[in-house]
Image (spheres, coloured by chain):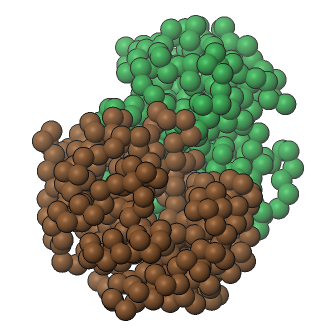
Chain colours: A green, B brown
Amino acid sequence: MAERAMTESKGNWSPLIDIRIVEVGPRDGLQHEPAVLSIEDKVSFVNDLSRSGVAEIEVGSFVSPRAVPQMADTDQVFARIDRRLGVLYSALVPNERGWERAEASRVDKIALFTAASDRFTQRNINCTIGESMQRFRPIVSAAKRRGVMVRGYISTVTHCPFEGPVPPSQVLDVAKRLLDLGIDELSLGETMGMAAPTHIKRLLDELLRHIPAAMLSLHVHDTYGLGIANVLTAWAEYGLRTFDTSAGGLGGCPFAPGAAGNVATEDVAYALRIAGAAVTADERAVVAAALKLEPVVGHPLASRVSRVLRKDLPSDVRCEVVP
Amino acid sequence: MAERAMTESKGNWSPLIDIRIVEVGPRDGLQHEPAVLSIEDKVSFVNDLSRSGVAEIEVGSFVSPRAVPQMADTDQVFARIDRRLGVLYSALVPNERGWERAEASRVDKIALFTAASDRFTQRNINCTIGESMQRFRPIVSAAKRRGVMVRGYISTVTHCPFEGPVPPSQVLDVAKRLLDLGIDELSLGETMGMAAPTHIKRLLDELLRHIPAAMLSLHVHDTYGLGIANVLTAWAEYGLRTFDTSAGGLGGCPFAPGAAGNVATEDVAYALRIAGAAVTADERAVVAAALKLEPVVGHPLASRVSRVLRKDLPSDVRCEVVP
């Protein structure tokens, strides 16, 4: 399987099977930053990202404003962004009320959220994995009727903060249940940032026996610096081509204890391109977009590539249209 | 070859074939920091590192103080450190005068410096690769007579800032010439930090046909965030077990344009351990040692693991003896 996928990934990609970057900075990134951005800053960030060559942008989350104040105004952000043809705009939806808001905001795609570990699911969304499936069922049906795509997040795919190591079979079980509901794409969330390529391989060896690589996205955090190694392994050895990343590595503050940001979009784009992949996301445009937020989030960007590129960018950073 | 090495690396390591961390922070790290440390700070850093479980410490460089002011007092640092049994203390030696100083300082090992690219060698040490070999010959002979081990650095093993991509055959040629001189170990320097695992594989596929993995160290920089991916590839797929790293990722300032520090010791130790390797270097002790220098170098440590661990370390950080 790995051998086949590797050969496949070394072939000439058609434009339709380029690397797909799912930019989660505006949601997963900003949600974990202590600073709360203005609507204007969020809209400007999404618009800049729309011109950076990413395939998809997770704009926000239709959760309760009390639960996540950083995401309180996702409806208004959707109302004001300039939607660029060819870019998908998605949002996290926790329940039917969230779906109604997402529908009203004309999202292209919704994301539902569960985990491979029951204790994590309990702590995170206050229900069991089984209960989360029941909660998803009417939302998936409604979304399907409206032609809205559905992504399913599976967190803790290798390690759970409460249960420890998570066996791949447990992830496969949840994945199958999500696919049975009619979900279009699964995002494999390595929540702790503790997995090495060996763990990712064990997971993908199991999943790819049952699920095509094209239905999977890998969502890793760079807590311990393993993010890029895991992305490269999933691409080169298993043919995954969709990766969830965050511009500037937003979400982890370099000075906050245990900061665990998403792996940075620009680091992933650079690594995959130099490894031989066809990547449309442009590091310079991504870094320029994230740098504008540096004064707002109040700390330097965590990514490696931003440290190299910032010297080359004009002090009045601008995002350019990527062809 | 890769298959065999992989199997080998998954076996049970004896204590003699654990991962060997060559801590180059006091030399390669501090040499590239704008701040110049006091002798006391350097001695304290080396002593802390001696208790962290690393196999070898590159203490300094016997270069001209005019050329590299950061390394001006390497003789005095050697005179004052507490040498710990089981740890090798080495230094960079550029010429016969440097060798005399190294000998007087009772170093365990010297390191000689060349590159796989002639233009880089010219710019860096002002001679051709061939001339560097002539310069090394009497030094290697003298070192051998005194029972001092010799390491040979080969820079620009995949990319050269002046010549671009460097073919593996060119690296092999330089490697063979160094081994012919009687050099004990080669350190493969990926100077630019631009290599992806694909480049490292191409290089090691060529070298390991002629040179045992045990004679090679991989020396990578984390400029674009590819360091850990390259280390894991060299270990898991080729059986390399010696890696040059820098505590705290010293050598690259997070706020300096194009900063290109060595890959951080603690990030490598963590990644290899979680991938299944036997690693004696202790991340907590390494981070504690590097954190003491933060006020002196004037910027936060660049490593990922230090961001996670700093919250757990007492504010008066101390290095503990690692069993």
Q: Quadrant of the N terminus of chain A?
A: bottom right
The image position of residue A35, as x and y in percent, is: 40, 17
Q: Quadrant of residue A108?
A: top right
| B68 vs B77: above or below | above
Residue plotted at (70% across, 61% down):
B119
Instruction: Between residue A135 and residue B65, name the one nearer to us.
Output: B65
Horizontal and vertical percent position of residue A226? 47, 53
What residue is rendered at 44% in x and 75% in y?
B96
- Residue A243 seen in the current view: yes
Q: Is residue A114 above or below residue A226?
A: above
Up the image or down, B20 lies above or below A286; here it is below
Question: In this image, A129 relative to B74: left or right?
Answer: right
Image quadrant in which the C terminus of chain A is located: top right
Q: Quadrant of residue B192?
A: bottom right
- Residue B298 versus residue A52: which sits nearer the camera? B298
Res. B207 image quadrant: bottom right
Residue A289 versus residue B52 in the image, above or below: above
Residue in front for this viewpoint, B103 or B320: B103
| Along the line of sight, the residue nearer the viewer: B250 or A65 | B250
Q: Residue at x 24, y 60 (%)?
A: B77
Measured as percent of width and height from the top left, residue A128 is found at 38, 41
